[in-house]
Amino acid sequence: DKFYRSGEEMTRRVPGTGLGLFLVKQMVELNGGSVKVTSKGPDQGSTFTISLPCAEKL
């Protein structure tokens, strides 16, 4: 699935479609990069790390 909300997230009134991270991941991967997500658990926040290759010097 492109996005997924479970449990409490299904009933919360959060604006948006939930597609933001999906779109970021697609754009980053199209440019040869990666997206990493880490979390310490529920209600602890998350860290998103985006890695992109560097361009060669001209």
Image (cartoon, helix red, strand yellow):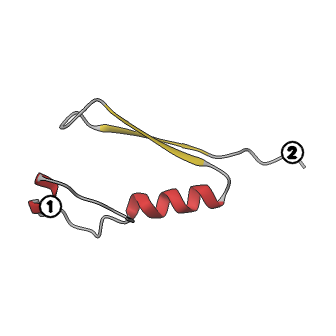
Q: Earlier in the sequence, mark 2 or mark 1?
A: 1
Residue wearing tag 2: 57
* Amino acid tagged 1: Met
Spot the residue most to the right.
58
Tell me which residue sits at (18%, 37%) in the image: 43
Instruction: Specify whether 55 is left or right of 11.
Output: right
Q: Amino acid at mark 2?
A: Lys
Element type where label 1 sits in the image: helix
Residue 10's disc number: 1
Horizontally, residue 56 falls left or right of residue 49, namely right
Determine the residue positioned at 54% across, 62% down: 26
Which residue is rendered at x = 57% and y = 47% of the image?
Answer: 34
Q: Nearer the viewer, residue 4 or 37?
A: 4
Looking at the rendered structure, the secondary structure element under dot 2 is: loop
Tell me the crowding category of disc 1: few under 14, some 14 to 19, or many 20 or more residues within 10 angstroms, Cα based: few
How many C-alpha atoms fall within 10 Å of the one at disc 2: few (<14), some, or many (≥20)? few
The quadrant where residue 4 appears: bottom left
Examine the rendered structure and indicate whether residue 13 appears above or below residue 38.
below
Whole-percent x and y of residue 13? 12, 64
Is residue 38 shown above or below 4? Answer: above
- Front tag of 2 and 1: 1
Is there a contact, CB below 8 Å, between mark 2 and mark 1? no
- Residue 11: x, y in percent? 9, 61
Query: Of 27 and 5, which appears nearest the observer?
Result: 5
Locate residue 33, reporting x and y percent: 63, 49
Left or right, 2 with respect to 41, comes to right
